């Protein structure tokens, strides 16, 4: 993190011949690659992945649906003008569930069914 990583995490893995290993994942911005010190390990493969950013619409305009529990706002992920995914926001489900004294999942399911 000191070298400029956005986040890091470790994952225990089993290597060939059942040797235990650790996968170290470092997330950084492409314009600021993280400089990692070389270690004593024999192999340090580096895989680069590009993260695509979806445009987000947070419940404005057409991002509201009517349910038996009221109007629920949801978030849409849009790529190239197409809705890739959408789901109700937690806070917009929690409050109607408390108001109507029903489980969170019931309101969430009603919102998904109405999409």
Image: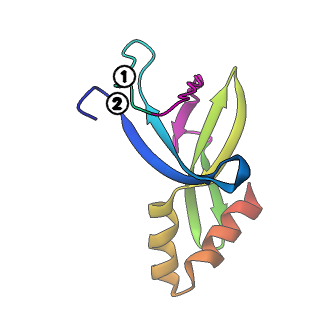
Q: Is residue 15 left or right of residue 10?
A: right
Q: Quadrant of the C terminus?
A: bottom right
On the image, the x and y values in percent for residue 10 come to: 46, 49
Q: Any magenta on residue 52?
A: yes
Whole-percent x, y for residue 8 in the image = 40, 41
Q: Residue shown at 56%/59% (left/top)?
A: 72
Task: Please say whether residue 77 is one of the residues in the magenta stretch.
Answer: no
* Residue indicated by mark 2: 5
Q: Quadrant of the N terminus?
A: top left
Q: Disc 1 designates what residue?
A: 34
- Residue at (66% x, 46% y) in the render: 86
Query: Horizontally, is 86 left or right of 25 in the view?
Result: right
Residue 100: percent from left, percent from top: 52, 83
Does label 1 or label 2 sit earlier along the sequence?
2
* Marks 1 and 2 close (CB-CB < 8 Å): yes
Look at the numbered disc 2 and give the secondary structure of its residue. loop
**On screen, residue 91 above or below 34:** below
Q: Please give the name of the residue rendered at 36% of the width and 22% of the height, measured from the top-left corner.
A: 34
Choose between 21 and 99: the one closer to the eye. 21
Give the vertical position of 30 relative to 74 (above or below). Answer: above
- The CA span between labels 1 and 2 is 6 Å
Foreground pick, 57 / 33 = 33
Task: Specify few, some or many for label 2: CA neighbours under 10 Å numbering under 14, 14-19, or 20 or more.
Answer: some
Callout 1 environment at 10 Å: few (<14), some (14 to 19), or many (20+)?
A: some
Please name the predominant secondary structure of the magenta segment in the image.
Answer: loop
Q: Position of residue 74 (x, y in %)?
A: 57, 51
Query: Is residue 71 toward the left or the right of residue 29 in the image?
Result: right
Of 77 and 18, the residue lying toward us: 18
Q: Residue furthest left?
A: 2
Magenta stretch bounds: 41-62
Picture layout, residue 37 above or below residue 102? above
Mark 1, secondary structure of its residue: loop
């Amino acid at each position: 993190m000191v070298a400029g990583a956005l986040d890091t995490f470790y994952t225990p893995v089993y290597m060939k011949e059942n040797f235990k290993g650790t996968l170290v994942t470092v997330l950084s911005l492409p314009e600021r690659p993280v400089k990692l010190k070389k270690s004593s390990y024999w192999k340090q493969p580096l895989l680069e992945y590009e993260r695509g950013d979806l445009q987000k619409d947070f419940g404005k305009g057409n991002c509201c649906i009517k349910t038996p529990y009221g109007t629920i706002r949801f978030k849409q992920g849009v790529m190239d003008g197409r809705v890739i995914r959408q789901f109700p926001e937690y806070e917009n489900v929690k409050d109607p569930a408390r108001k109507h004294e029903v489980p969170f999942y019931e309101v969430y399911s009603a919102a998904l069914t109405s999409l």
